[in-house]
Image (tube, coloured by chain):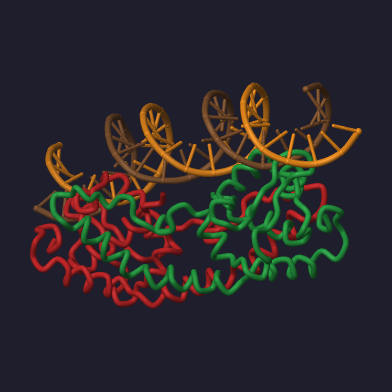
Chain colours: A green, B red, C brown, D orange
DNA sequence: GGGATAGGTAACAGAATTGGTTACAAATGT
DNA sequence: ACATTTGTAACCAATTCTGTTACCTATCCC
């Protein structure tokens, strides 16, 4: 079970909410229910993907690298899910089988799963972090101090 | 890395090819490059899902429970992927956070990922095991003894 | 400059999952 | 009866994931 995608989306939504001023990994970890180092580790990935930028030192933290309207869940998914085909495929189906069946099967499955993966990508691309924020705002009017950080 | 989906599809395509007469887990394992027990374990799942049926004893084995044209990759995916939302979600985002943010975030993400999952399902539903067999046949004209099992 | 704050990263531990393997009981055809 | 084959439990090694500690570096403020 990969919680990174969910935690990353959580964090990005949070950052979008307090856009302009950086948020520390401690605050983010508290909100996401995890450990600051986990957040920082995730930040490394998101930073490499160009989704956030961080400032060290006192008063530092992380903020979005571009507006929340221009970060899609597909961006997050790509950043966090190291190898996309991993989703289904096909580490095994032993390529060193007696014959080529294994390898051919792998190619065939990749070809047939392609549309499924593509469909999912399209759907993810249609949702922005900003929309996540709006959804959240509707569901959490004012219950939570962290939500307005 | 979950190889079960790929192995299951491999097996079902194989069974579709020799429809009518049962295939032993040993033959299937050899073709898929894994261990007979792994195949049998997978069969338990596929049998529960109503995709195959097995015969014990001498001359036994497994065969498709219905025509390969009427088994979709979505059927396989559902059977093999124990909890579908597992795909992305959201085991953590600690529900016992200070506030409801964790739980609400979880609900929100599920709502927003819904379309993505649905799109993938639709695409998987559009491909049958029979199509996988045809794809395979095109790619492996006659190279492999196992392919004609 | 010095201290406090905060990120970057390595390293390790514990839990969970996965796949391969052995072992054995139960069923079935010859 | 006996050989064959499934069903299933049990175990191991490898991998992955998350949490945690530790320590270095960068930055701000005095």
> Where does residue A91 sit, x and y in percent of width and height?
33, 51
Q: Examine the rendered structure and indicate whether residue B2 appears above or below residue A122.
A: above
**Looking at the image, residue C14 lies above or below residue A72:** above
Q: Where is residue B128? Give x, y as percent.
A: 33, 74
Is C25 above or below relative to B15? above
Residue at (55%, 63%) from the top-left corner? A75
Task: Give the percent coordinates (x, y) of residue B97.
Answer: 77, 47
Picture quarter with the C terminus of chain B: bottom left
Q: Residue B122's spot in the image, x, y percent?
A: 46, 76
> D16 or B121, which is in the foreground?
D16
Q: Does the image show residue B58?
A: yes
Quadrant of residue A10 within the rendered picture: bottom right
Q: Is residue B69 left or right of residue A1?
A: left
Q: Residue at x 39, y 73 (%)?
A: A115
Q: Quadrant of residue B50?
A: bottom left
Residue at 78% across / 54% down in the picture?
A21
Q: Nearer the viewer, residue B111 or C22?
A: B111
Q: How many numbered marks have been drawn onto this rendered protein structure?
A: 0
Can residue B96 be seen here? The reply is: no
Query: Between C1 and B50, which is closer to the camera in this rendering?
Result: C1
Q: State left or right for residue D5 relative to residue A78.
A: left
Left or right relative to B102: residue A125: left
Query: Viewed as shown, does residue A42 lie left or right of A113?
Result: right
Q: Is residue B70 above or below residue C17?
A: below
């Amino acid at each position: 079970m990969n919680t990174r995608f969910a935690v990353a989306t959580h964090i990005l939504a949070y950052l979008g909410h307090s856009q302009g001023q950086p948020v520390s990994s401690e605050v983010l970890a508290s909100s996401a229910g995890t450990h600051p180092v986990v957040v920082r580790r995730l930040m490394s990935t998101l930073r490499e993907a160009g989704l956030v930028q961080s400032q060290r030192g006192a008063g530092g933290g992380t903020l979005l690298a571009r507006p929340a309207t221009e970060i899609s869940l597909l961006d997050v998914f790509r950043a966090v899910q190291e190898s996309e085909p991993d989703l289904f495929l096909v580490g095994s189906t032993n390529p060193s089988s007696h014959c080529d069946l294994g390898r051919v099967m792998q190619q065939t499955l990749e070809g047939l799963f392609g549309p499924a993966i593509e469909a999912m990508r399209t759907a993810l691309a249609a949702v922005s972090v900003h929309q996540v924020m709006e959804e959240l705002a509707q569901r959490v009017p004012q219950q939570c101090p962290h939500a307005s950080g």
